[in-house]
Amino acid sequence: MYSRFLVPLDGSPTSLLALDHAADMARLNGATVVLLHVIEPTRHSTGFERPKVYIEDVRPHFLAAGHALLDEAANRLRQDGIATETVLLESTAERVSEQIARQAKENDCDLVILGTHGRRGVDRLLLGSDAEQVARIAPVPVMLVRQSRRKEIT
């Protein structure tokens, strides 16, 4: 079966749901979970900062936030006895989806477990779908996890 899962995290509820699924599957299979966070500097910068301000103030802040996200998720898995590794990347000109697919190969993962918002229509066209792109280009199977849209009857 699967022995190494890659779980990209961005801190969103859907990525944390994917983490829950990965934890359940890892417990059943004795698998290792590789947690990945890709920092997109353009999300943390206006582009008007002087280089010194960016290097000394902005970049350390988003690197620390990325490490904190990975550490919190890794500690949660390790408390359950799940072997865990972490990878923190800074985005380059390459799309996040391409970096996720590359990390699956470089870390010898045999399954990617990825949260998705399940956008449709205009939202999907405007915002794109990294999850869909990962499913298309990943060298291994991809499990897409999204929150249920069912309404509970009370």
Image: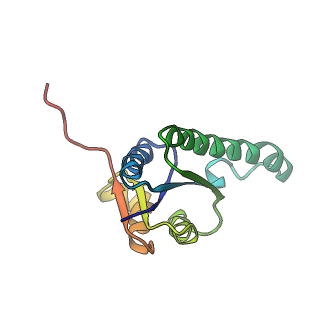
Relative to residue 67, is residue 30 depicted above or below? below
Q: Residue at point 14% right, 24% down?
A: 154
Q: Quadrant of the N terminus?
A: bottom left
Q: Image quadrant of residue 138? A: bottom left
Q: Residue at point 45% right, 56% down?
A: 31
User: Where in the figure is residue 124, as x and y percent of width and height?
Assistant: 36, 58
User: Where in the figure is residue 9, as x and y percent of width and height?
Assistant: 51, 50
User: Where in the figure is residue 139, as x and y percent of width and height?
Assistant: 45, 75
Left or right, 109 with reference to 46: left
Identity of the residue furthest to the left in this view: 153
Relative to residue 16, is residue 87 depicted above or below? below
Q: Between residues 51 and 131, which one lies in front from this camera angle?
A: 131
Relative to residue 3, is residue 43 depicted above or below? above
Q: Residue at point 39% right, 68% down?
A: 135
User: Where in the figure is residue 73, as x and y percent of width and height?
Assistant: 53, 42
**By what rule are the colours in the image chosen?**
rainbow
